[in-house]
Amino acid sequence: MPGWLSHFFHRALLASSLLLPVSGFARTEVLITGEWPPYTGVREPQGGSVTAVVRQALAAEGMDVRVGFFGWNRLRPLMATNKDYSGRFPDYYSPERSKGCHYSNVIGESPLGLAELRTRPLHWSRVEDLVHYRVGTVKTYVNAPLFDRLASEGEIRTVESADDEGNLMNLLNGAVDAAIIDRNVYAYLISRSPRLKAQADKMQLNQKVLIVHRLYVCFSRNEDGRKLRDRFNRGLMSLQAPGPK
């Protein structure tokens, strides 16, 4: 993660006074997200590190935000049908998705890697090398473009799970040779999940990173969404600006 992002993630988590509803704010925007700790989560401090950044960026522009948590597969349909939702996050950029979004500036990064068994490490240098393995994935997740194409064509054998924890359990149970997972999510889960924590010493992250996804807020693809995106970006920039010396 770039240094400035790490810095204002830290500031966002500490600046709790900026993250609470304030009656003096001009308006409240409603954004939606899914459960993806430590980035987002209804039980996480400030709703997760990315949620904290989103709140603080809007607070810098004098706006409050209410965040709704839904299943990931519901976010895009909800945005399309409910005009009360101003945007969703965190979102990967894609040309297809950009047709329905005014994308914000970058709010974080997701380094995607491969979890493996310590006794059976992967040997690969290119995505094409993964055709020799069974790879665990999570339903509805976007992975890496070439990987997803090869998987859809049947070149890479995949086993789908409902969530990241289930994906790692498949690895531990021998159903797959590797599990695609965000490296920060991996660290979070093996320290929090009782099932995974008990067997954490059996797993490790492969040293090679599959892809680093940048994270964005997808604001509604209309004039109000464009204006809100511009205000959000301005607030986001203010978080990066150095304070008085």
Image (cartoon, rainbow, N blue to C red):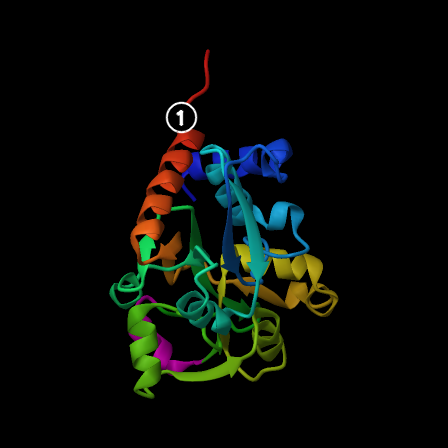
The answer to whether residue 128 is magenta is: yes
- For the record, the magenta segment spans 125-134
Q: Residue furthest top?
A: 245
Identify the image quadrant of the N terminus: top left
Residue 31, given in percent of the width and then of the height, sits at 50, 54
Image location (x, y in percent) of residue 23: 61, 36
Up-down relation of residue 150 to residue 74 (above or below): below
Q: Is residue 214 visible?
A: no
Left or right: residue 105 versus residue 119 is left
> Where's residue 34, x and y in %?
54, 63
Residue 225 sits above or below residue 167 on the image: above
Picture quadrant of residue 61: top left
According to the picture, the residue beneath numbered tag 1 turns out to be 241
Residue 148, above or below 103:
below
Residue 93 coordinates in the image, percent (x, y): 32, 59
Residue drawn at x 36%, y 82% is 156
Identity of the residue drawn at 37% across and 76% down: 130
Foreground: 146 or 8? 8
Crowding at mark 1 (Cα within 10 Å: few <14, some 14-19, many 20+): few
Query: Of helix, strand and loop, which one carries label 1?
Result: loop
Q: Amino acid at mark 1?
A: Ala
Residue at x-position 31% and y-position 54%: 102
